[in-house]
Amino acid sequence: MPDQPSSARGVATYRRIIDFATREFAQYGIAGARIDRIVAAARTNKAQLYSYFGNKEQLFDAIFFASLERITNVVPIDAEDLADWAVRLYDEYLHRPDLIRLATWARLERRPAGHLVTDHDRYDDHKLRAIAGAQAAGRVRQGDPFDVLAMVIAMSMAWSPVSNVYAATAQEPATVHDQRRALLRDCVRRAVAPE
């Protein structure tokens, strides 16, 4: 994230820009997002936005990388219980669907192949080490730790806002979410169980 302004008024404007730009990018992607809509909703102007973020691409980057940090910090991996981690990711997607949509736009508009971000080690290294440690201890099936990570994340996204089958919402009955959590937990547990 760029440096935040020091005055209370500047911080409030900065926060509004981040909030409205997050919604704008999540809904329309990088190409479809409009700076005019962001500054109007944030009650500021283009000059102020550009002074904080540089340009539209840099604004997206600030928001996107903050969303990756949020997922890492709010839903830290537990390689000893990857099934529970998948369920916690499912819950995060319900409460913050914009985060998964931002990642999807980055995939569609920036990096259609390979790792989602160029500095993926920054976000994946500790996860891969945790999975490798669980594999060495015989608690997780053998195989490339990255492939195990990718599979568990993909399973957690089965009902996410970018699902090709069904996008769940937080407004659905709790019993429905409980059934999905139980199925997800069981499927991940079986998928990663040592052979």
Image (tube, rainbow, N blue to C red):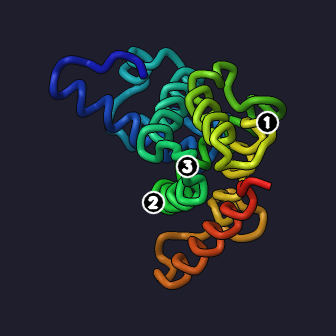
- Mark 2 secondary-structure assignment: helix
The amino acid pointed to by label 2 is His
Q: Residue furthest right?
A: 113
- The mark closer to the camera, 2 or 1, is 1
Q: Is residue 115 visible?
A: yes
Residue linked to disc 3 = 80
Give the distance between the C-alpha atoms of the residues marked 1 and 3, in whole angstroms.
16 Å
The amino acid pointed to by label 3 is Glu
Q: Quadrant of the C terminus?
A: bottom right
Residue linked to disc 2 = 95
Q: Nearer the N terminus, badge 2 or badge 1?
A: 2
Q: Are marks 1 and 3 in contact (CB under 8 Å)?
A: no
Would residue 134 be found to the left or right of residue 96 on screen?
right
Position of 24 relative to 159 (above/below):
above
Q: Nearer the N terminus, badge 1 or badge 3?
A: 3
- Mark 3 secondary-structure assignment: helix
Would residue 153 be found to the left or right of residue 37 on screen?
right
Circle 1 packing at 10 Å, graded few (<14), some (14-19), many (20+), is few
**Which residue is rendered at x = 18% and y = 28% of the image?**
9
- The tag on residue 144 is 1
Q: Residue furthest left?
A: 8
Would residue 101 be found to the left or right of residue 53 on screen?
right
**Which residue is rendered at x = 49% and y = 38% of the image?**
72
- The tag on residue 91 is none
Q: Residue furthest front?
A: 137
